[in-house]
Image (cartoon, grey):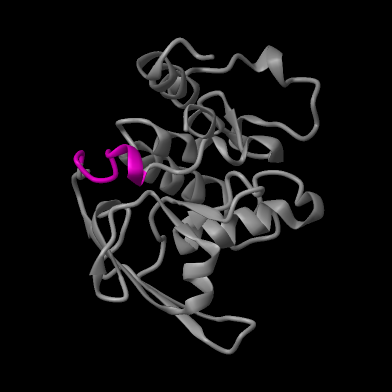
């Protein structure tokens, strides 16, 4: 569809790094320069999955870079703290998921695509009474890249976590670093679901 993985990555890179001329949004009250990361418009909720699309490529670490850029730029603790209208709570929902380190890119599946946690520690109490702890010691703007991941003490290389695994509770522990781990999550079996893979199977 995109002309291959290389072209797909190039298009994503261009989207986040391009300059979008003002003429494309000057008459739109919902979009200002402050709402842009390159040509990516975070205030346009249907595009919220886009930073996670690197997970399907050989460069999934780029999601970890851009997600933190978006979180830093689009969310502030003040009256104008959201980079767009909170339609049906989606701006807030994206924030909560992305701060935890995962997001439901394809809601028709049971998978949440992994990014990177924004905070060093979070704890969720689940509807079944169990808890999920998310640990990312030392995570920061500098140490934004996932070096390795463990789920309940076992090495976890997949680029997604399932709803079932979340409901089981336990501990999701990220080791973070200043440089990307360019080898993690590259095996076909570690990639999230895609329709293409389903057809090929």
**Residue at image x 24%, y 70%?**
154
In this rendering, the answer to whether 102 lies above or below 43 is below
Question: In front: 182, or 120?
Answer: 182
- Report if residue 187 lies within the magenta region: yes
Question: In front: 147, or 76?
Answer: 147
**Residue at image x 44%, y 19%?**
8
Question: In front: 136, or 133?
Answer: 133
Q: Quadrant of residue 7?
A: top left
- Report if residue 177 lies within the magenta region: no
> Can you say which quadrant of the picture contains the N terminus?
top right
Q: Position of residue 28 (x, y in %)?
A: 79, 26
Q: What segment is highlighted magenta in the picture?
A: 182-190
Q: Quadrant of residue 88?
A: bottom right
**Residue at image x 49%, y 84%?**
131
In this rendering, the answer to whether 146 lies above or below 40 is below
Q: Position of residue 173 (x, y in %)?
A: 30, 70
Q: How many marks?
A: 0
Q: Please name the predominant secondary structure of the magenta segment in the image.
A: loop
**Residue at image x 69%, y 12%?**
23
Q: Position of residue 41 (x, y in %)?
A: 62, 32
Residue situated furthest front in the rendering: 201
In this rendering, the answer to whether 176 lies above or below 168 is above
Residue 57 in sight in this render: yes
Residue 76 in sight in this render: no
Q: Position of residue 104 (x, y in %)?
A: 58, 51
In this rendering, the answer to whether 158 lies above or below 69 is below
Q: Is residue 38 left or right of residue 149?
A: right
């Amino acid at each position: 569809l995109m002309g291959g993985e290389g072209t797909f990555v190039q298009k994503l890179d261009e989207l986040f790094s391009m300059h979008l001329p003002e003429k494309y949004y000057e008459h739109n009250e919902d979009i200002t320069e402050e709402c842009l990361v390159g040509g990516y418009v975070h205030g346009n909720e249907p595009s919220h999955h886009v930073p996670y699309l690197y997970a399907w490529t050989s460069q999934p670490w780029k999601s970890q870079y851009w997600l933190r850029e978006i979180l830093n730029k689009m969310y502030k603790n003040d009256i104008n703290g959201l980079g767009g209208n909170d339609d049906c709570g989606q701006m807030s929902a994206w924030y909560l998921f992305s701060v935890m380190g995962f997001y439901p890119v394809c809601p028709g599946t049971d998978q949440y695509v992994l990014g990177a946690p924004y905070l060093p520690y979070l704890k969720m109490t689940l509807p079944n009474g169990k808890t999920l702890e998310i640990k990312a010691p030392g995570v920061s703007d500098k140490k934004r890249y996932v070096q390795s991941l463990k789920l309940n003490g076992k090495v976890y290389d997949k680029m997604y976590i399932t709803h079932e695994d979340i409901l089981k509770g336990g501990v999701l522990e990220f080791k973070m670093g200043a440089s990307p781990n360019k080898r993690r999550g590259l095996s076909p079996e570690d990639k999230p679901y895609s329709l293409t893979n389903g057809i090929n199977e």
